[in-house]
Image (cartoon, rainbow, N blue to C red):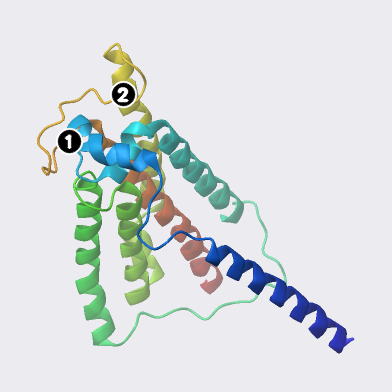
Amino acid sequence: MKALRLLLFAAGALGLAAAFVGAGRKLPPVGSYAGAYGEVLNAVALGERRATDVVSAVNFDYRGLDTLGEEFILFTSVLAVATILRRQEDEEDEEDEPKWEPRKAPESDAVRTLGGVLVPLMVSFGLYMISHGAVSPGGGFQGGLVLASAPLVVYLCATAKTFLRIAPPGLTRAGESIGAAGYVLIGCLGVLAGKTFLENVLPLGTPGNAWSSGTILFLNLTVGLAVAAGFTELLSVFVEEVLRREA
């Protein structure tokens, strides 16, 4: 029986390896690009949207409606996971549920010092990525993840109670909702201006300036808020469970 399993594994592994090799041989040369869409955007995005980061121009302007869908996919996913994992008030403990030893704050001065240095740097860098998404690589999604990592570092370098003190669940839920609603409200500016939903109707400014590209900047801000609050909300669900089992 063991020999048969090994034989089946070997056959599957060889087939998978052959598929990878075949697909790799058909890949285009490194650095080549045959898509006309990207070439057109590189040529017109700076003049039309004053955005030096063409990816942000695509995500938050040319393809802004798709990004709205992606943001609400994240919003509903966080809502569903938090609803499933968060303990209900009338839920009873299982008899065989293991008890955890209380987690103590790290005693190492080096760990605490590193956390104290990393957190402000992560917050500053996350805010920079969000606010400069139209100017340099980054944006709301990437910057939001960096911001959400800061409370996690606090948890690792301190305690679960400290994490919930700086990122209370009520505040993170409100931030996620405001971020998601803000994207829609900014999109409605185009409708109020007599144009289409999510059409860029604000002054575009000067290329290379953080306060440029019209609505792209503000859409980045709303997405950054929603992503940061959403992932922090997920982390808080697990931290609350840690505290409950330690009690």
Residue 133, x across and y down, in percent = 24, 47
Give me the C-alpha separation between circle 1 and circle 2: 15 Å
Where residue 223 sits in the image (x, y, percent)?
Answer: 34, 43
Q: Position of residue 155 (x, y in %)?
A: 37, 70
Answer with the quarter of the image where residue 31 lies: bottom left
Q: Which percent across, then down, holds residue 226?
A: 37, 44
Q: In this view, does 95 lie to the left or right of 193?
A: right
Residue at image mark 2: 199
Asked if 130 appears above or below 60 in the picture, the reply is: below
Residue at position x 34%, y 42% from top? Answer: 38
Residue 119, quarter of the rendered image? bottom left
**208 left or right of 5 in image:** left
Q: Residues within 10 Å of mark 1 (few under 14, many from 20)?
A: many
Q: Mark 1 vs mark 2: which is more N-terminal?
A: 1
What secondary structure is marked by label 2?
A: loop
- With respect to residue 198, does 243 lie above or below? below
> Who's the residue at 51% across and 42% down the image?
73
- Label 2 packing within 10 angstroms: few (<14), some (14-19), many (20+): many
Residue shown at the point (45%, 59%) measured from the top left? 28
Can the viewer see residue 57 in this picture? no
Q: Is residue 170 visible?
A: yes
- In this view of the protein, which residue sits in the foreground, 38 or 243? 38
Tell me which amino acid carries mark 1: Arg
Return the mark for residue 74. none
Q: Name the residue under label 1.
A: 50
Which is nearer the eye, 229 or 47? 47
Q: In this view, does 112 lie above or below 48?
A: below
Using residue 125 as the reference point, say whether residue 175 is left or right of it.
right
Are discs 1 and 2 less than 8 Å apart at CB? no
| SS class, disc 1 | loop
The kind of residue tagged 2 is Glu
* Residue at the (31%, 37%) spot, across then down: 40
